[in-house]
Image: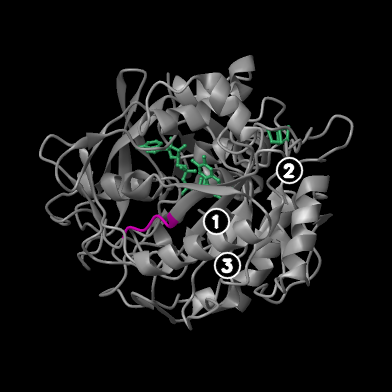
Amino acid sequence: MTRTEFDIVIIGSGAGGGTMARALAPTGARILVVERGTHVPREPENWDPTAVWKALRYRTTETWRDESGAAFTPYTHYNVGGNTKFWGAVLYRLRREDFGELGHVDGVSPAWPIDYDTLAPWYDKAEALYHVHGQHDVDPTEPPRGPYPHPAVPHAPRVAAIAEALRAEGLHPSPLPLGLIDPGQPDGCTLCATCNSFACRLHKKSDAEVCGLLPALAHENVTLWDGASARRLLTDASGQRVQAAEIERHGEQLTVRAPLFIVSCGAVNSAALLLRSANDRHPGGLGNSSGLVGRRYMAHLATMMQGFHPWRVNDTVFQKTLAINDFYLAGAHSPYPLGQIQSQGRTHGIMAKIVGDTIVPRIPLWAYNAWVARGVDWLAMTEDLPREDNRVTLDPDGTIRLSYRPNNLEAHRRLVKVTTRLLHKLGFWKVMAHSHKAKNTTHQCGTLVFGSDPKTSVLDPFCRAHDLENLFVVDASFFPSSGAVNPGLTIVAQALRVADHIRTTLHP
Ligand SMILES: Cc1cc2nc3c(=O)[nH]c(=O)nc-3n(C[C@H](O)[C@H](O)[C@H](O)COP(=O)(O)OP(=O)(O)OC[C@H]3O[C@@H](n4cnc5c(N)ncnc54)[C@H](O)[C@@H]3O)c2cc1C
Ligand code: SF4
């Protein structure tokens, strides 16, 4: 008979949930991890750009609706390890300033209820757990820290030359912090050209399955139910505690009971789960006395850019090693933050063709292959600000509706302009830019913000729901602001901090 009583139920196995499982496994508590997806198989298609980008082999086929009601398929993945299986493993700390109130072109980025120093020891642990390689003391925006657990991944010659040229322009390029296992070593990560947006066939990318869940499952007290989706959380009669979760597993409906529930379904799905769990005591959705469940959704403003030179073939294989943070806190001619510029993984011809076909159809693939062989790829990323109208709701038929109007666009426009100018200065003849705009859900965050005041936040500073004494949420939904660095390491660090809090204060 299937066991349905546990000490701790963790829902979702991505950056937050997978890390949480690993951190709580040694407690000996009977832990159930509920994950709607299954393991990503290790197969040739992992690294096949056509399978990944054209056939969308690993993405969800679920549809959501946008503000206007139009259906779209979100750029997200449901599988063991969540979106971390496909991430670029750029594992940044937020800057010290991101934790305070920060003025932007378009308004104010609010302060966090904890400061950088509170999270710093957990960032240290997160970097150790996720094998982060980096170099400290070269990035002008770096918060106080010691050396990285592992040295930075060296730049390929072409990227090293670009870094040199950027320094000659008076900038301070720095190595990207990367979560890779033994890069360049025998039996380690091979530093291939299919990392960001691809799953690692070798399991040498630091993702939440490799660094979180698999080590957790080595403990016999940890159980994984994959292919199991949490439909609703049920409270006791007082409405103060979650008593059980309704789970749909391979067509079977199960009710799982535990004294402690940790939700980590990703910012959109965690909000949707709480909204779906509305009951008499929580008519607006679970934990929603503030009315903020689902609100203040953020996702970053991101533009993919490519510098092209017709005579310079780019022979770089692993290109994602360089960052420019000189405009993170202020632009050259603006007192406001613009964001971050990162080198990106290599664009493959099929990826360029998919975008190109939406503009000028029928250009053959060989032409795109020739084009991308002469390009160097970049990502320009700007913080978006939390607005209450940017939100997750449920339509009457249960479909997720994501209403999102990007803001801080002027800051992003300036960042793209600065990047374009820089690339021209570096000698690129042509600079291309492309953005998925409002439909890019890869950096989703901020739908269940944490804070000290139950009137203005959903979770407390340890990510426990203000309204429910045994419900924690540890995915990206707790972010009160999005910063302009990749969110993953902050999710991991906070999950480790919350796990420690649970271990020391609540462990059942
Ligand atoms: C292509 C790509 C590249 C990226 N690159 C980077 C990068 O380089 N650096 C970085 O920091 N971030 C990167 N990100 C973002 C990063 O992956 C996410 O910020 C991070 O994974 C979010 O963690 P999470 O725990 O909030 O959610 P997720 O990792 O998405 O995990 C949520 C999990 O919950 C499961 N789930 C959802 N609903 C339910 C339910 N009802 N019941 C059971 N299970 C459920 C999902 O299947 C999923 O496994 C990237 C993302 C993508 C897609
Ligand atoms: S081998 Fe290294 S670079 Fe290639 S996918 Fe795996 S972790 Fe990424």
Q: Residue at x 40, y 55 (%)?
A: 299
Residue behind mark 3: 94
Which residue type does callout 1 highlight? Asn
Query: Distance from label 3 to label 2 (Cα)?
Result: 19 Å
Query: Viewed as shown, does residue 121 lie left or right of 315?
Result: left
Ligand 2 within 8 Å, label 2 CB = yes
Residues drawn in magenta: 297-301
Above or below for 467 versus 23: below
Q: Position of residue 59 (x, y in %)?
A: 43, 29
Query: Distance from label 2 to label 1 (Cα)?
Result: 16 Å
Above or below for 351 versus 289: above
Mark closer to the chain start, 3 or 1: 3
Ligand 1 within 8 Å, label 1 CB = yes
Asked if the residue under mark 1 is in contact with the one under mark 2, i.e. CB atoms within 8 Å, the reply is no
Q: State which quadrant residue 247 falls in.
A: top left
Q: Residue at x 72, y 64 (%)?
A: 166
Which residue type does callout 2 highlight? Leu
Residue behind mark 1: 486
Which residue type does callout 3 highlight? Leu
Q: Main secondary structure of the magenta part?
A: loop
Q: Position of residue 440 (x, y in %)?
A: 39, 45
